[in-house]
Every structure is written in C-alpha cells, then in structure tokens.
Image (tube, grey):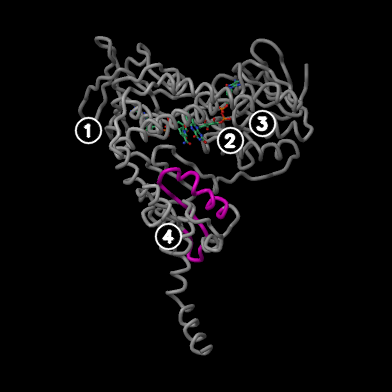
Amino acid sequence: MKTYDLIVLGGGAGGLTVAAGAAGLGANVALVEKNAHLGGDCLHYGCVPSKVFIASAKKVYEAQKSTERFGLTLTGEPDIAEAMDRVKAAIAEIQEEDSDERFKDLGVDLYKGKGRFINEHQIQVGYGNVIEGKRLVVATGSRPSVPPIDGIKDIWYLTNETVFDVKETPKRLVVVGGGPMGLELAQSFARFGAEVTVLETNSTIFGKEDEDVIPVIKKSLEQELTFQFEAVAKKVREEDGTKVVTYEQHGKEIDIVADEILMATGRKPNTDEMCLDKSGVNVDDRGNIKVNEYLQSSQAHIFAIGDTNGQYPFTHAAGMEGKLVVRNALFGFKGKVSYENVPWVTYTDPEVFHLGLTEKEAKAKFGMNIKVFKVHTDKVDRFIADRDEVGFAKVVTDSKGHILGAHAIGTNAGDWMQEIIFAKAQDHKIGDISNVIHPYPTHGEILQQSADLYWREKLFDGVLPKMAEKYIQWFR
Ligand SMILES: Cc1cc2nc3c(=O)[nH]c(=O)nc-3n(C[C@H](O)[C@H](O)[C@H](O)COP(=O)(O)OP(=O)(O)OC[C@H]3O[C@@H](n4cnc5c(N)ncnc54)[C@H](O)[C@@H]3O)c2cc1C
Ligand SMILES: NC(=O)c1ccc[n+]([C@@H]2O[C@H](COP(=O)([O-])OP(=O)(O)OC[C@H]3O[C@@H](n4cnc5c(N)ncnc54)[C@H](O)[C@@H]3O)[C@@H](O)[C@H]2O)c1
C-alpha cells in the first residue's frame, strides 16, 4: 500500500490549492478526484460557466439597450446555444491551468475515482487502490440541494449541473430560489428572451446584504424579472407538454406554467458518500464537517475545507482555507482561520459587493459609535460619463476610521471595490485611501471620495478646525 504525507480528497478550488501548495513544499501528496477532469464545481458547473453566460447575456442586453438609445434597429434573436458553446470553450481554456499533467509535473500522485474512508488513515479509490495518509484533507465540495417537492422526481428540471447544456431559450422559466445562483442565472435567461419568474421563500432577496443595498438591487432586478416572495414551491407536474409549479403563498396554492424549471435552492455538502463514519469525523445536522479554528475535524489529522465545512461557500474562501491547511497539516502550525476579510460579489447587473459588517451589524456590535461614508455613483465623473448612475459605495468604520465593512452596488462593483479589501485586510483606516492618487477619471475614485468625506468631517467638526483657524491667524 502506498503511503503519503497528505491525501487530498477532491480536486476542486480547495483541494487543488492544497495539493499544489503541499507538493510545492516537497510533501508526498495524493489527490483523489471522482470526476474525469480536475477543477471542481467552480470550473465545470459554477463560477466559470455562470460568469461566461452572464457576460454573453450582458452583451445581448447592452446591444438591445443601445439600439433603443441611438435609434438603431436590431434584428434577429439571440442564440443561447452560441452562448453555451462559449461557456464550454472558456471551461476548456481554463481547464488547462487545472490539467492532470500540471499536477503530475508538480509531483502529485493523481487517483481518479470516488474516495471512501476505510478507516481514519486509509482511503479506497473506487473499488481499487487503497492508500494511506498521515494527514488527510476533505475538499469534496457540495451539490444541489433540492427540497422534497411533490412530483419533482417524475419531471425533468435544471440545476447548475445541467443548465449550461440548454440549447434553446425557454419561453417561460420558473427559477425556484432567489439566492445568488438563482438571480445571476434568472437575469441572464431573461436577457436571452425568457419570461422569468423567481419563487423565493423569504420576503426579500439579498437578505444578507446591507440594508441600503437591498431596495436598490431589488428595484433594478424587478425591471427584468417577476418575483413571488414568501412563496414556497410545493408541487410540480407535467401537463400538455409544459410544466406546472404549484407554490404556496400567504396560505393559498397558486399554479404557474413553465417550459423549464431551474432549481436554485441551495447546496448540500458531499460528505454523505465517502463512509465518513469509518473515519471518526463528526458532521452537523446538515452534513457539514465540523471543524475547529485550525480547520481540523473531530480527528485532528483530518482537515475539512471549502463547501464541505459549510462556512463560506465561495471559491476564494476555499482557496484561503486551502493555503492555511497546507501550513497546519504539513508543519503542524496552529494558524487560525479568519473570515473577517472574506468579501463576496453577486454578479447580477448591477453587481453587489460585500465585505465585513453591514451598517446594522456594526451598530449591533459597536453601538452608535460608528461612522458611515457613502458616495453615489452619480457624483463620480467616470460613472456619469458611462451613464452608470444607479449605485453607490458605502464604507462603515468605527469612530477612529478603522474599516468594519464596505458595501457597493453598481456595474462591475466587484472590480472597483478591490482597494477597500486591501485597506481593511492591512488594517488601514478609511482616511488612508484619500492619500492614494487615483487616476482621473476612474470608477475607483468612488472610494477616494468616500475617504474624502472622512477627512471633511474631521476637518470641519471637532477640535482640528479651531486649531487650524488659530494657526492661520498666528501665521498671518
Ligand atoms: C452556479 C454557481 C455559481 C457560483 N459562482 C461563484 C462565484 O462567482 N464566485 C465564488 O466564489 N463562488 C461561486 N460559487 C461557489 C463555488 O463554486 C464553490 O464555493 C467552490 O467550488 C467550492 O470549492 P470546493 O473545493 O469546496 O468544492 P469543488 O470546487 O466543488 O470541488 C470538489 C471536488 O471534489 C470532488 N469529489 C466529490 N466527492 C468526492 C469523493 N468522494 N472522492 C473524490 N472526489 C470527490 C468533486 O468531483 C469536485 O471536483 C458558485 C456555485 C454555483 C453552484
Ligand atoms: N457570486 C457568487 O459568489 C455565487 C454565485 C452563485 C452561487 N454561489 C454559491 O453557490 C451556492 C448556491 O447558491 P444558491 O443561490 O442556490 O443558494 P442559497 O442557499 O444562497 O439560496 C437558495 C434560495 O432558495 C430559497 N428556497 C429554498 N427552497 C425553496 C422553495 N421550496 N421555494 C422557494 N424558494 C426556496 C431559499 O430561501 C434561498 O434564498 C451558494 O453557496 C452560493 O454562495 C455564489
């Protein structure tokens, strides 16, 4: 039996980071992946395909909008099959970075097949090889969680694993679930010409966002999508070649007819098909592997990262956890995980950016002793030039200007808010951004203006202006 310093289960965002990092440091590493290709959900069924589809849909939408604006005529229908071909091409291109050869060249032993625990140190791959690891990392990701809706097993429906194979735009699409996946895809389908209804159990979308963000994004998406809030999908059936979804809303059962249904109702961790019980690793009631601050499971030599531990279900969080686990597993360091500076972006149009505490959370934690600096895009020249005047950036700080959170909505907000992530992670105060020279005119100036508000407040309130006035009088 081959033995390894480290066995990594799952070759996705988290697992690949660990395998590459550990092999690069000279460890003897095995990587077990059940799929034919490395890359995981993010590359094959998640971030990459969704962002390529979003980009195509945005081009279609902008073409339509600009013809309206400039009095031109656009003919023809957008071809969703073309967009999906582009999705496949982008996956193939990015796949090269995650190729088997690259990992073999790094010295990683690759095993293709489903990994299962035989005991706390040994893994069987498929029904073949058994390998042993001194330490192990579970990075097996998650899969769609479809609620027990009546009739769902008897009909064909889309999930993130099949949606990028559609060849025609469904005329009527029902999206069950108004989370990031549901909304990003719903808007893109609408831009390809589908009539889209989103059913959402909660009373709002973007419930985790800052309270100022929610009405703006809601209003924006309502221009392209129909929402049914406090609506729970209960039953589905096929009727005369169409699909009917019955949802319950305010005590009533309502039918909606669709040509396709997209289930976007969240995820469940891939922890139930690897005989975890034989490893002694504990999971919570949702199947997430329970980890401590060092990302160790109930078995100290078995670590869990990415979607399997249920903390922050994002590619960049899996990557961050992967880097930490390389150090903790290989060198026995006790590096603690921190999610304080993990941002996320929802790639609707406009995009929504989130970092740290919302204003409400900051008030709950620090009382009224916080400050808010908010600048709307219609006050920043580059946004005006681009006619992107719906949106804002908002920075929440403590009384001394330390950044507690930052939130934004606007076209490409995920890009023009990057500077604040750096500033917060490096413990800079908001005022420091004011001293950075931002080329004119750029979208990033919105953060400089937010920082300028901080200085304006400092200069015009408090003791500083009085001292300055005295100094100027003396200097005269
Ligand atoms: C539609 C959609 C869009 C998304 N967009 C974004 C986005 O824009 N930005 C973002 O940050 N996040 C996004 N995410 C989330 C992101 O995809 C996940 O958080 C990320 O992939 C988690 O990484 P991971 O390493 O935990 O799992 P994965 O990347 O899924 O990797 C897990 C790997 O383990 C393998 N595996 C499973 N079981 C076994 C087993 N028993 N043995 C061996 N191998 C196994 C799987 O085949 C897979 O390759 C999106 C998700 C979806 C569904
Ligand atoms: N931009 C990004 O980073 C991005 C984009 C897409 C997905 N993701 C990740 O992918 C994962 C999946 O996203 P998601 O949007 O599916 O999950 P989610 O859990 O965020 O949202 C699911 C939504 O479905 C609703 N829902 C559940 N059952 C329902 C029912 N029967 N009827 C009506 N509504 C119902 C829930 O209330 C919830 O709002 C998440 O972990 C997310 O972080 C990230």
How far across and how far down the image is residue 445, in percent?
A: 48, 56
Residue at horizontal 36 percent and vertical 33 percent from the top:
63
Instruction: Report, in whole angstroms, how far the alpha carbon at label 1 lies from the one at label 3.
Output: 46 Å
Asked if marks 3 and 4 touch (Cβ < 8 Å), the reply is no
Q: Residues within 10 Å of mark 1 (few under 14, many from 20)?
A: few
- Amino acid type at circle 4 is Phe
* Whole-number angstrom distance, CA of label 2 to CA of label 4: 31 Å
Q: Assess mark 2: CB under 8 A from ligand 1? A: yes
Ligand 2 quarter of the rendering: top left
Q: Which residue is mark 3?
A: 302
Q: From the viewer's perspective, is the residue at label 2 or at label 4 nearer?
A: 4
Q: Of label 1 and label 3, which has the lower sequence position?
A: 1
The residue under label 1 is which amino acid type? Answer: His
Nearer the viewer's eye, disc 2 or disc 1? Answer: 2
Where does label 4 land, which residue?
373
Q: What residue is pinned by disc 1?
A: 250
> Residue 377: where, in percent of width, then height?
39, 52
Tag 1 and tag 3, C-beta contact below 8 Å? no
Give the Cα distance between marks 2 and 1. 39 Å
Amino acid found under the numbered disc labelled 3: Ile
The residue at label 3 has a CB less than 8 Å from ligand 1: no
- Secondary element under disc 2, as helix, strand or loop, is helix
Quadrant housing residue 196: top left
**Image side of residue 374 versus residue 424, left or right:** left
N-terminal label among 3 and 4: 3
Asked whether the residues under the numbered discs 1 and 4 touch, taking CB atoms below 8 Å apart as contact, a structural biologist would say: no
Residue at image mark 2: 318
From the top left corner, tell me how far across and down residue 85 is, in percent.
Answer: 48, 20
Query: Would you say the residues marked 2 and 4 are in contact, meaning their CB atoms lie under 8 Å apart?
Result: no
Magenta stretch contains residue 438 = no
Region of the chain picked out in magenta, as a range: 397-424
